[in-house]
Image (cartoon, rainbow, N blue to C red):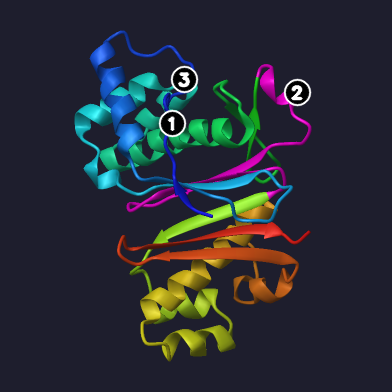
Amino acid sequence: MEKDFKTEDPLCPADISPVMGRAIRLARLLETSRMVFLPITGEGRGEGLFILDNLDAITSEELEAAIASLPQWRREKTLRFKFEQGRKECAFSYLLLCPAIREVYGITEQPSFSFGEHGKPELSFNSQLSTLNSQLFFNISHCKQAIACVVSDQPVGVDVERIGRYNESLARHVLNDSEFTLVSQSPDPQISFTRFWTQKEAIVKLTGRGIDDDLPNLLLKYNNVSLHTEEHLDKGYILTVANYRV
């Protein structure tokens, strides 16, 4: 089931910039942005995929308001990016996560991140997570075209990539012989390659073990993983969500 995601309060509680006009503009931007809530598994699992794919419509003024609304640690991380595109992706990735955890779990507290052994981020809260009956997992991916955020009560990984990165050298590094043949003989190798690429990257992010040394055979190696792939060809990107079969 898919529905447009709307929220009356698109920001988690925070020390919003005292310039209220900025906060109001930011609220309106997130309210009217194309966010999609999509349950991706059966009943009984709290899981949702949220997408923001109008990044090119965000103005410099709106980006400034977004950065001002972030907690200090995330604001500092965002400002380390030299170019505006990187700052957009960093700021709005976090701002998309906030309504995602509120929609699925009812959490309104701004999260912080901690990191596992191989750098996979985990959510940490001051208080609210302790009230949940299950552990909360999340994953975020972004490219120039879109940001994807998935939250779940099970380990999960997501990858979103723009279409157009295919070349033979890269494909031979990522794909096994069978996959390479499928891609090279497909009507549109760019789409086919990006589909495989997001599936493998989503698995890598699901496991949290970093880049696997056997990317060509990754889909065979993790045959206990369920993959949900979406092709947004009109927007120029493909995304995949990976989780373990239950």
* Mark 3 element type: loop
Task: Report the amino acid beneath label 1.
Answer: Thr
Quadrant for the N terminus, please. bottom right
Instruction: Point out the tag, 2 or 3, that comes first from the N-terminus.
Output: 3
| Residue 52 seen in the current view | yes
Start and end of the magenta stretch? Answer: 126-155
Q: Residue at x 26, y 19 (%)?
A: 22
Indicate the position of residue 118 as horizontal and vertical percent values: 67, 46
Indicate the position of residue 140 as horizontal and vertical percent values: 52, 45
Instruction: Point out the tag, 1 or 2, that comes first from the N-terminus.
Output: 1
Disc 2 versus disc 3: distance between alpha carbons? 21 Å
Question: Mark 1 against mark 2, which lies toward the viewer?
Answer: 1
Q: Is residue 230 left or right of residue 116?
A: left
Give the labeled residue for mark 3: 71
Which mark identifies residue 130? 2
* Between 77 and 64, the one nearer to me in the picture: 64
Q: Is residue 101 left or right of residue 184?
A: right
Q: Residue at x 39, y 36 (%)?
A: 92
Callout 1 environment at 10 Å: few (<14), some (14 to 19), or many (20+)?
A: some
* Between 1 and 47, the one nearer to me in the picture: 1
Instruction: Point out the tag, 1 or 3, that comes first from the N-terminus.
Output: 1
* Mark 1 element type: loop
Q: Residue at x 58, y 88 (%)?
A: 178
